[in-house]
Image (tube, rainbow, N blue to C red):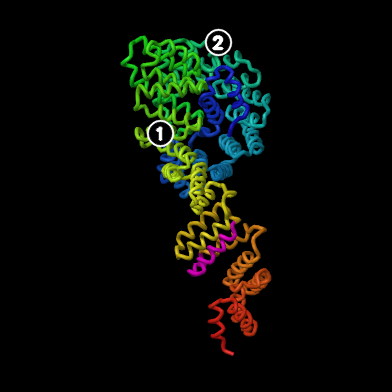
């Protein structure tokens, strides 16, 4: 659960550095910090005086919990409880394991059991309040945490959680008081002081006071990671050198964490230390797990990151062949681009002597123009770089996108095809090239491209809809309607035509294909009552009542108000058949009476009512119904009539 007051800081934090908005790392850091204490469990002094038969499982459970193996811990502690249902500590620690597994409801049950067995102990109340909070029971959480505070005011955890509850209730002043109460109880409860720092920024925009809180945390614990991160962010404009130092410490503490390294590079760029900033940014890019097939083609944030990844990798391949001066320039331009200073990056690149002959310079210039929204220039330079390096797949992709936006469909196809020859695994281009083929009226090629993409991403509704349009233009109606239904474009489905096509498929006895079509449309459009009817007829012919029974109720529930009387009559007949099979013959007869009233030519209704009358010994009524059904062409009715002995 987010603490809204703290997360709102992100919006104001963008005032300090607009480049922060490029990535959501800072927001993620605040979110993680805001909820971290909720997912941690309060330490509990363990009573080791227990039955030796329980000790091994209990020890193993605690070890697994400490080693972040909550699933194994749950198993171990369950074994303890099965042997001794009064082991209250096992319930407490199993609740911790289950909370870590996000099994909040049963974790709550364990805590209630522990509290019942061991009276109301402080740690149990705090943990129960956390569970209620995580389950959005803020009011209940507050009642429980107040009990914990009354039980022991000298400990900080309950006061801290009370502050979080106050924040969730938008009571900032009370939250500040609660965090201060926490610090009065435990002056080294660093998270409370950091929360106060964030609230100083959010409520008062008082950076000086916020930094004072963070400084105090770091005086007591110079390696406190959250305080280092936030001090580096908030103190950037006041002492950027200290911010760089804070980030350097974070990098040493967590060398694989790319967030501090990115900001470290960003701040070094501000200081003009492009050599070290370039190293930081290259490290960030090399650790970002964003593949080329996540490319969207609409200049989204992900697209920009992929651009930077690819141009950065290309620069690394070529930079060591450049002169020291040119290498320094291109590093500077790259760092400025990463810092979202596209205009300055372009100026640096324009000053390079090989600005039109070195592919890495031209490629970087194209990306800089694109990110600076100077798209005609970007298109021009993507073309120039391909003249210098015709194996640069990324440039074909980018030029193809621009040509597509200019509706130069044939040229965009050429670029996308060149890309796929160089990088056959780039299946996302099939999705994009399919659009160009469609507008060129080359529908078979469009369908082939969309199908190739859907083999990798079968649930993409946009592509399913696009392929449906291509099928429709090719007059492949049923395939078009299947795609429209699967993509949620039900307005494009002609259900009358669907019925006719299914009938034609059944005519050639391809029931498997017919059922595939019907299942697809019924799943997408439960109100397609006619489809249910066709399914029922297929299953009845096979005597597959187990498949009919669960769907009749669904068909009745979702039946449209505008269905034809014969369709409604048939649906009521199916309901009656199920009633008869459950021996509720009186209700079945009522349903069949109603079905016949809606459609006097419903031979199945006459047949089934005749069967019921025959079983009841009402021979005259049975004979009358069977004659009606026989006259309507029902062969089973004719056979039953012949078997009646007068």
Front residue of this view, candidates 607 and 549: 607
Mark toward the viewer: 1 or 2: 1
Residue 189 versus residue 126 in the image, above or below: above
The residue closer to the viewer here, 612 or 400, is: 400
Which of the numbered marks, if any, corresponds to residue 414? 1
Q: Secondary structure at mark 2?
A: loop
First in residue order: circle 1 vs circle 2:
2
Magenta segment, prevailing SS (helix, strand or loop): helix
Residue 359 occupies which quadrant of the picture? top left
Residue 466 image position (x, y, % from top left): 50, 43
Q: Which stretch appears magenta?
A: 528-546
The local crowd at label 2, few if under 14, some if 14 to 19, many if 20 or more residues have their Cα within 10 Å, is few
- Which of the numbered marks, if any, corresponds to residue 117? none
Quarter of the image with the N terminus in it: top right
**Image marks 1 and 2: residues in contact by CB distance under 8 Å:** no
Label 1 secondary element: helix
Q: Does the stretch in magenta take in 120?
A: no
Across and down, in percent, residue 182 comes to: 60, 25
Above/below status of 534 relative to 377: below
Q: Residue at x 61, y 14 (%)?
A: 209
Q: Quadrant of the C terminus?
A: bottom right
Does 545 lie within the magenta span? yes
Q: Residues within 10 Å of mark 1 (few under 14, many from 20)?
A: few
Q: Residue at x 64, y 36 (%)?
A: 138
Q: Which residue is mark 2?
A: 238
Comparing 469 with 338, the one in front is: 469
Q: Is residue 453 above or below residue 585?
A: above
Which residue in the rendered view is the most extreme toward the left? Answer: 321
Q: Quadrant of residue 163?
A: top right
């Amino acid at each position: 659960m987010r603490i809204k007051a703290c997360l709102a800081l992100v919006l104001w934090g963008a005032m300090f550095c607009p480049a922060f908005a490029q990535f959501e790392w800072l927001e993620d850091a605040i979110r993680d910090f805001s909820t971290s204490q909720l997912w941690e469990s309060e330490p509990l002094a363990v009573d080791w005086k227990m039955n030796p038969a329980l000790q091994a499982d209990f020890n193993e459970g605690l070890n697994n919990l400490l080693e972040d193996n909550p699933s194994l811990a749950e198993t171990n502690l369950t074994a303890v409880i099965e042997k001794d249902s009064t082991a209250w500590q096992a319930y407490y620690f199993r609740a911790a394991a289950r909370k870590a597994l996000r099994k909040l409801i049963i974790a709550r049950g364990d805590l209630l059991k522990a509290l019942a067995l061991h009276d109301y102990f402080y740690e149990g109340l705090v943990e129960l309040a956390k569970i209620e909070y995580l389950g959005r029971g803020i009011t209940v959480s507050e009642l429980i945490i107040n009990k914990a505070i009354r039980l022991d005011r000298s400990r900080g955890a309950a006061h801290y959680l009370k502050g979080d509850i106050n924040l969730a209730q938008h009571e900032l002043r009370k939250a500040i008081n609660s965090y201060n109460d926490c610090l009065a109880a435990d002056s080294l409860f660093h998270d409370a002081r950091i929360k106060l720092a964030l609230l100083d920024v959010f409520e008062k925009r008082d950076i000086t006071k916020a930094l004072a809180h963070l400084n105090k945390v770091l005086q007591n614990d110079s390696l406190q990671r959250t305080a280092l991160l936030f001090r580096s962010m908030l103190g950037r404009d006041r002492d950027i050198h200290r911010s760089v130092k804070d980030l350097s410490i974070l990098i040493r503490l967590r060398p694989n964490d790319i967030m501090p390294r990115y900001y470290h590079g960003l701040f070094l760029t501000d200081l003009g230390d492009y050599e070290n900033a370039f190293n930081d940014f290259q490290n960030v890019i090399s650790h970002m797990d964003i593949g080329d097939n996540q490319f969207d083609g609409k200049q989204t944030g992900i697209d920009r990151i992929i651009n930077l990844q690819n141009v950065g990798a290309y620069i690394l391949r070529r930079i060591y062949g450049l002169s020291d001066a040119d290498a320094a320039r291109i590093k500077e331009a790259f760092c400025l681009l990463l810092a979202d200073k596209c205009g300055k990056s372009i100026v640096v690149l324009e000053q390079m002597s090989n600005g039109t002959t070195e592919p890495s310079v031209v490629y970087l210039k194209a990306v800089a123009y694109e990110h600076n929204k100077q798209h005609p220039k970007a298109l021009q330079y993507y073309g120039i770089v391909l003249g210098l390096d015709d194996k640069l797949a990324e440039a074909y992709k980018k030029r193809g996108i621009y040509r597509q936006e200019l509706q130069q469909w044939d040229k965009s196809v050429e670029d996308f095809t060149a890309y796929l020859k160089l990088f056959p695994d780039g299946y996302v281009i099939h999705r994009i090239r399919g659009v160009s083929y469609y507008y060129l009226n080359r529908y078979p090629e469009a369908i082939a491209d969309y199908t190739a993409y859907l083999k990798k991403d079968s649930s993409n509704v946009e592509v399913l809809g696009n392929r449906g349009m291509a099928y429709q233009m090719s007059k492949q109606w049923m395939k078009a309607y299947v795609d429209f239904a699967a993509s949620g474009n039900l307005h494009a489905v002609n259900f009358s035509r669907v019925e006719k096509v299914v009938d034609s498929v059944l005519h050639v006895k391809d029931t498997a294909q017919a059922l595939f079509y019907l299942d697809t449309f019924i799943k997408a459009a439960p109100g397609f009552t006619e489809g249910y009817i066709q399914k029922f007829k297929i299953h009845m012919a096979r005597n597959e009542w187990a498949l009919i029974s669960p769907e009749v109720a669904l068909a009745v529930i979702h039946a449209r108000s505008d269905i034809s009387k014969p369709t409604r009559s048939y649906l009521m007949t199916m309901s009656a058949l199920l009633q008869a099979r459950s021996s509720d013959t009186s209700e079945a007869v009522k349903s069949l009476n109603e079905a016949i009233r809606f459609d006097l030519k419903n031979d199945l209704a006459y047949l089934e009512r005749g069967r019921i009358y025959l079983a009841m010994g009402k021979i005259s009524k049975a004979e009358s119904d069977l004659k009606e059904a026989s006259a309507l062409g029902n062969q089973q009715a004719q056979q039953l009539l012949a078997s009646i002995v007068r």
